[in-house]
Image (spheres, grey):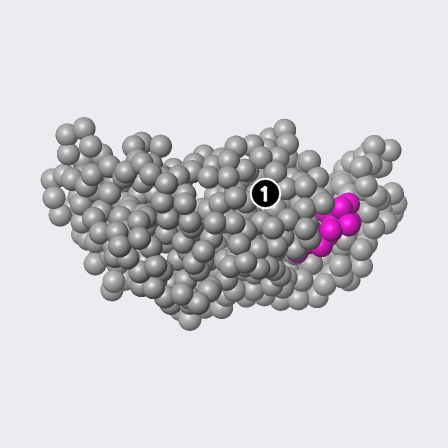
Amino acid sequence: MSSDLKRLLESALPPDAEWASLRRVRTEGRGYQAKDGQFEEAFDYVDEGYMVEVLHEGQFGYAALASAEPAALKAAAEKALRLARAAAPRTIHPFGLEVRPATVARYDTPRKLRAAFGADLLSRQAIQLTKAMQISGKIVQAAAGIDARDIEMELVSTSGASLEQHLHILGYEVQAIARDGAVTQRRSANGPRGRNNQGGWEFLDIAGGEAEARRIAEQALELLSAPECPSMTADLVLAPDQMMLQIHESVGHPLELDRILGDERNFAGSTFVKLEDIGTLQYGSELMNITFDPTLPTEAASYGADDIGNPARKEFLVKNGLLVRALGSLESQRRSDKPGVANQRAQDWFRAPIDRMANLNLEPGKDRFEDIIASIERGVFMEANRSWSIDDYRNKFQFGCEYARLIEDGKLAGTVRNPNYRGVSSRFWRSLFKVGDASSFGIFGTPNCGKGEPNQVITTGHASPVCAFRDVEIFGGEA
């Protein structure tokens, strides 16, 4: 990183500012998509800009700009000061430098293969993946995509913060759609855009990709003749690629501390969790251990510090089923007097950071997958998210999956299509009775979690073993 942010901040600093910071974000992205054996499209972009933040009389003001030209930066800093000054008489809570630490840190995504693959190889690989899925005339669409983002972030402040981070995120998507008469089924690699990792190009499995693509197409065809998932109350076993969605919607969003404080009610919804629940609510069974962990190297939302410089570390949110901590930044912690985490994150240079999920994981247990299945007399094993719906309080939910197999007398039985289940968040988690060991652990992520007003779309990571839940309402049909 070569930009001289400290000098730029000093030259732009308004004389009346009590404190100021300058954040620079540069993103380079590229991607390649193919469909039905043909190259479809490619994209390549570079985006760079700056955010000035100013503190005045307990309030922060922000101004973003796409230029490092000194006069423009000075004008932006003055605008940020005017906004902070205007907000001061209408304060909800006064802040000081206790919520802007003077962190000095560097973070670089650990990578084995740092040199990027060429456009010819990546576009050819996307094409070959779609060809590998064309195993029958009933495969009416075969699609594949590969994308990568390099994100540089720098932050300096007048109190001495100096943060440099370089994130490398890879996305991979393979999907087959099969149709026979009126029946249409979709099968993908771990659900829509579920394959998002942070790391080097080693995550792109060139050798094994075509075999996986064929398996996906075979399962799409298998679903065409499979019976509908039966409607029943039974035990439910979820694969890690569906646990990703379950954790995200029924744990992650409800525990965002700014949402608990009421900030999101008019846009992204509220939560069933109350401030007084932190430290007292039995969120799930004693087997439920949820951690916020932005230090896990291969997970999509790993970093050394959040976007205001709060150093990142692993924290338990739910420990042995008890809610012990919320997803709250230093600002939300100050407002609520509740413990939180380093999660004040922004989508890009043109947004102010807010409380967000990062890596939110369910810690492994002690049960082997085979033993979990063997413990169930009647149930369903579901993989990969297909549909989701949850109420404004992040409480009542209904989720559908792509692929499922019945469990009968301790053994996996026949495949069923259109599997769905519904529940109530904390009641559902209190029914957790088996948690898989490390051998069943999977790391996934999503690049498109939306929240905030104006909206911010951000990457999150979720990791989990296979999990089993008792007496869940399961049903078939299009959800």
Residue located at (31% from left, 43% from top): 402
* Amino acid beneath label 1: Pro
Q: Is residue 308 visible?
A: no
Q: 85 or 310, which lies in front?
A: 310
Q: Residue at x 76, y 46 (%)?
A: 336
Q: How many marks?
A: 1
Percent of width and height locating residue 33:
31, 46
Q: Is residue 393 rendered to the left or right of residue 100? A: left
* Image x and y of residue 309, in percent: 69, 58
The residue nearer to you, when weighing 28 against 403, is 403
Residue 37: image location, x then y, percent:
19, 45
Q: Is residue 145 left or right of residue 358?
A: left
One can see residue 438 in this view: yes
State left or right for residue 273 relative to residue 229. right
Q: Position of residue 362 (x, y in %)?
A: 50, 58
Can you identify the residue that label 1 sits on? 254
Q: Is residue 52 magenta?
A: no
Bounds of the magenta span? 329-341
Task: Indicate the quadrant containing the N terminus: top left, top right, bottom left or bottom right.
Answer: bottom right
**Quadrant location of residue 267?**
top right
- Which quadrant holds the C terminus? top left
